[in-house]
Amino acid sequence: MKFAGLIVMPAGFFLSMAALVLFPAAGPRTAFILCALAVEIVGLIVAVRGHMENRQPDAGDVR
């Protein structure tokens, strides 16, 4: 999951750069950039969750 999150974040960045080049009108460009930012946020969430520790004890762990 860490790797997937780290791949998705730059994809969102390149989507927003493509929107600047491809869309001359402000409306579609803004909508596309907002979607690209959402992709970056999802990538960040996946990367952070992949680095979090598992807080549940193992099945063999007796306390």
Image: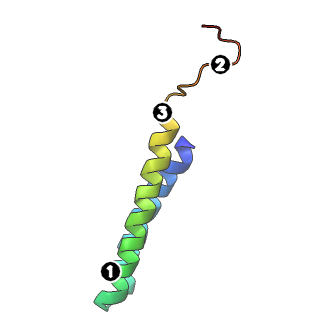
Q: Quadrant of residue 13?
A: bottom left
Q: Residue 51 carries which label?
A: none
Specify which label sits upstream in the sequence, 1 or 2.
1
Give the image location of residue 63, x and y in percent: 60, 7
Tell me whether the residue at label 2 lies in contact with that at label 3, contact meaning CB atoms closer than 8 angstroms.
no
Give the image location of residue 20, x and y in percent: 33, 79
Specify which label sits upstream in the sequence, 1 or 3.
1
Q: In this view, does 63 lie above or below 56?
A: above
Disc 1 secondary structure class = helix
Q: Which mark is residue 30?
A: 1
Query: Residue at left 41%, top 64%?
Result: 38
Q: In this view, does 61 lie above or below 56?
A: above
Specify which label sits upstream in the sequence, 2 or 3.
3
Q: Residue 52 carries which label?
A: 3
- Residue lying at the far top of the rendered structure: 63
Disc 3 secondary structure class = loop
Q: Which label lies toward us, 1 or 2? A: 2
The amino acid at mark 1 is: Thr
Q: Which mark is residue 58?
A: 2
